Amino acid sequence: MKQIVDSRTRPLRDLRISVTDRCNFRCNYCMPKEIFGADYPFLNRKEILSFEEITRLARIFSSFGVEKIRLTGGEPLLRKDLPQLVEQLALISGIKYITLTTNGVYLSKYAQKLKSAGICRVNVSLDSLDDEVFKGINNMGVGVDSVLKGIFAAQNAGLEVKVNMVVKKGMNDDQIMPMVRFFKEKGIMLRFIEFMDVGTTNGWNFKDVITKKELHDMISEEFAIEPVNPHFFGEVAKRYRYVGTDTEVGFISSVSETFCTSCTRARLSTDGKLFTCLFADQGHDLRELLRNGADDEDIQSFIQNVWERRDDRYSEIRTEESQKNRKLEMSYIGG
Ligand code: SAM
Ligand code: SF4
Ligand code: SF4
């Protein structure tokens, strides 16, 4: 194993793999339906990495000490035969932990298969418990029930489950406390994600962000919560526990309390580009190397070179101006 660090001494530890840029939702904050319409140029089959290509790259990443992989998208459960990919990734000796981020709609169908294939945890995104609010966000007429069914199916299959809620002022602030009460009672960790300026299509404005502090204060009015020590260097969510219970609540404060200094994540897009930041405007083409006969050592040196030059810290230096720069969409780069 060859540990590498970037120009800010951050090791490469995690790999997020986007397995599709398509989605069965059109969440306003991610894939607004006005932009991602019938004529949107999604990637075609030839452009996207095959399972063999993804697995080969994952093996090379593991040679740098990457132990954790997160599958994401788009909606990863739209990728045909996804459990087969999970099986292949689970066979890589260095890979210890494979997780999946999903909107949950197809979880009841796949939970058992995913567990058997080697998924350890699912992060299910759910922004509301109210059908009308939820339908207004996903723009596909999907009700809350199908996501809740997916969450419980995942639990029954023995998967660890965390629920992610993006909060945006005026969109779902009235859902914060109902979500807190519901998931506390179920003993499931709920994590709040601050609305971010990913991509250029979601009309981001700082005024729409509900910060970690505001959320923390709101929850504390009803429940006593205490901070929990991070599990590892680079843990993204700031974790708290409801006093007297084992149930946690977390905050992903990418806007108000940035965490670039401990960012150990690389991202692989559906078409095989390596991104070293969620807010990057360009990636490094690994697919070209794969398809032009490069051997593992060539690809390894390429990745090492990219990582050692990495200087990203977008969230730390976000300004009104940089916020407007061209950035890639989250559904493409992988959330
Ligand atoms: N479709 C899957 C899902 O929704 O879980 C996986 C991909 S999605 C891009 C990954 C995560 O990014 C989701 O939890 C989603 O809520 C979050 N997300 C998308 N756009 C966001 C934004 N502008 N700000 C904050 N979080 C966002
Ligand atoms: Fe799809 Fe997830 Fe983006 Fe919503 S957040 S549009 S479910 S990729
Ligand atoms: Fe990592 Fe970029 Fe996010 Fe900072 S802004 S935490 S460097 S992905």
Image: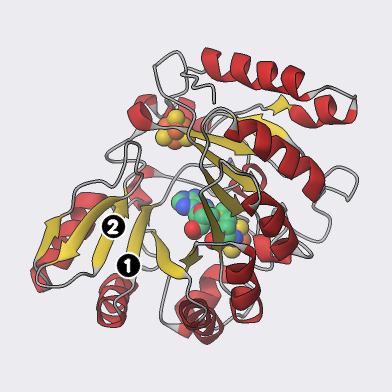
Percent of width and height locating residue 13: 48, 34
Quadrant assignment, res 161: bottom left
Percent of width and height locating residue 64: 55, 27
Q: Is residue 93 above or below residue 122?
A: above
Q: Which residue is mark 1?
A: 189
Percent of width and height locating residue 116: 62, 70
Q: Quadrant of the N terminus?
A: top right
Q: Residue at x 54, y 13 (%)?
A: 309
Q: Residue at x 25, y 64 (%)?
A: 248
- Of residue 102 and residue 27, the one placed in the foreground of this image is 102
Q: Going by the image, does 290 lie left or right of 110?
A: right
Evaluate whether residue 123 shows in this view: yes
Q: Going by the image, does 53 lie left or right of 119?
A: right
Identify which amino acid the numbered label 2 is placed on.
Answer: Gly
Identify which amino acid the numbered label 1 is placed on.
Answer: Met
Q: Which residue is mark 2?
A: 250
Q: Secondary structure at mark 2?
A: strand
